Image (tube, rainbow, N blue to C red):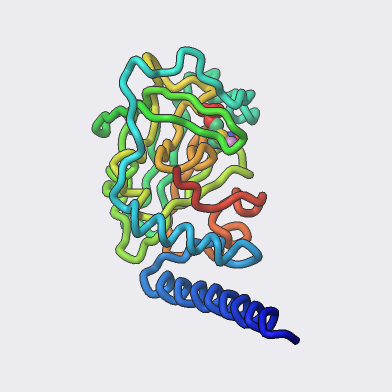
Amino acid sequence: MNRISRRKLITSGLAAAAGLSGLAVADRLALRYGLVPPDCRGVYGPGETLTYASQRLLTRHSMAREFPRGMISQDPFANELAPPTDEFKRMQANGFRDWTIAVDGTVERPLSLSIADLHRFPVRSQITEVACEEGWSYIAEWIGTPLSGILHEAGVLPQTRYIVYRGIEPWWWESIDMADALHSQTLITLGMNNGNLPVPFGGPVRLRVPRQIGFKSIKFLVRITATDSLKSFGRGLGSASPEAGYAWWGGI
Ligand SMILES: Nc1nc2c(c(=O)[nH]1)N[C@H]1C(S)=C(S)[C@@H](COP(=O)(O)O)O[C@H]1N2
Ligand SMILES: [Mo]
């Protein structure tokens, strides 16, 4: 072996070792500061941990971009959904008067909230963008009440680390950490632009999480569950998205 190729070998070996121990150090730091995402296992696991941990350290208090009224999309693209179930159609025919959202899990007072109940909470609005991982996006005004107020009403217990939430279709469920759950822009949405939230956009009620990608904003919201661990939900990866090959954390 000549000198040059030997030196090459040593340098690349060192680089590999540095890369590996760098990841290990990052992993230990992430663990110490509670920055490990639920989909941290598997081939992309270390990458997911690094992304989530570094983004969280930088963006824990940051705001999703809000837009001026003039930038609201004239023709927003809904990932057009037919009313998903017979139960949905029955409630729709009745003006969603029977719609309820259950709030349960690690809370002092489990709640069952109707749309009328939700209208009694403080009203907030925001003009933010929905972006789908498949490439489309649009800007709309979203009107509703912050999730934080509902969680406060239910009395979220101190061990709570995540909020799991579901739409009426059993296969759609997501979760967010408390930084996003208590964030002022995370909105239980009842209205869009100039009226009630239309069904294709998730009516009668949708959880908007504008700091994350589109699939975190679940339509037809029926259940909100506080928990200290995501292990017992689905395959333990935090939501339906990583089970389908996407990331649990989709910050934008
Ligand atoms: N209940 C429910 N919520 C859902 C979906 C769905 O199929 N069902 N699709 C998700 C995905 S993948 C995206 S990108 C956005 C799309 O929102 P839009 O239809 O308003 O564009 O909704 C998300 N929320
Ligand atoms: Mo999407």
Ligand 2 visible in quadrant: top right
Q: Report x, y in % for residue 143.
A: 34, 26
> 14 or 228, which is in the foreground?
14
Q: Is residue 170 above or below residue 128?
A: below
The answer to which quarter of the image holds residue 155 is bottom left
Tell me which residue sits at (64%, 30%) in the image.
85
The answer to which quarter of the image holds residue 10 is bottom right
Q: Is residue 115 above or below residue 28?
A: above
Query: Which of the image's four quarters has the C terminus?
Result: top left
> 134 or 165, which is in the foreground?
134
Tell me which residue sits at (42%, 36%) in the image.
208
> 203 or 142, which is in the foreground?
142
Q: Is residue 149 above or below residue 200?
A: below
Q: Report x, y in % for residue 231.
A: 54, 65
Query: Which of the image's four quarters has the N terminus?
Result: bottom right
> 111 or 134, which is in the foreground?
134
Residue 222, can we see it? no
Q: Residue furthest right?
A: 1
Q: Report x, y in % for residue 76.
A: 51, 19
Residue 93, can we see it? yes
Tell me which residue sits at (40%, 18%) in the image.
72
Q: Report x, y in % for residue 211.
A: 40, 42
Tell me which residue sits at (60%, 75%) in the image.
16
